[in-house]
Amino acid sequence: MNKAFVKESDREDDEDLPEGLALPAGTRNYITPQGYERLRSELAHLMNEERPNVVQIVSWAASNGDRSENGDYLYGKKRLREIDRRMRFLTKRLDIAEVVDASLQPNRDQVFFGATVTYLDRAGQEHTVTIVGVDEAEPLAGKISWISPVARALIKAREGDTVTLRTPAGIDELEIVQVSYPEPASG
């Protein structure tokens, strides 16, 4: 089928991303060793297992004849496009990734990438977050991106410091209670 009749585009893969996953211009793609390994294993799984399985299904469906009403064929082709798009995205992200091992941080009392920070907000609620890369952020699990407003407010502060967090709801004061880093791997 001619691409003119298909609702697809050849846009850059990063344009399809939610706003939180796009890297600001001129910044590096910092990532923890665990996050890097997770992205690598996802890429390997897509390349070595999922894509070959879908190709096999599409090939079988294509051999059945009329492709215009063949659900297995149409869905399979769509799934192949999704897999290929994700593989391109992962490849690009891994190529520009800068792995930062937080366990090697010499200034362990100051907040940098990879730190786990416990802080109190103005209401006295305690929060614990770990500052990680954009591709590994899970706010509900306490992993926040290093480019998030909270992380930017915390970076370079020390235990006992009070930092200002500007939010759409107003200004909040965060008191840093504890800063910790993973222990270096014994080797």
Image (cartoon, helix red, strand yellow):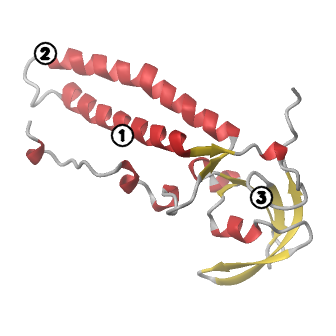
Which picture quadrant has residue 178?
Answer: bottom right
Residue 129 seen in this snapshot:
no
Cα–Cα span, label 1 and label 2: 27 Å
Q: Which mark is residue 64?
A: 2
| Of labels 3 and 1, the one closer to you | 3
| Of labels 3 and 2, the one closer to you | 3
Look at label 1 and name its amino acid: Arg
Image quarter where the N terminus lies is top left
Look at label 3 and name its amino acid: Phe
Residue 31, horizontal then vertical, whole percent: 64, 46
Q: Which mark is residue 85?
A: 1
Q: Residue 112 carries which label?
A: 3
Looking at the image, do the residues carrying marks 3 and 1 touch, with CB atoms under 8 Å apart?
no
- Secondary structure, mark 3, is loop
Residue 130, horizontal then vertical, whole percent: 74, 54
Residue at image coords 82%, 43%: 103
Cα–Cα span, label 3 and label 2: 57 Å
Q: In this view, does 140 lie above or below 122?
A: above
Q: In this view, does 173 lie above or below 66?
A: below
Residue 54, horizontal then vertical, whole percent: 33, 23
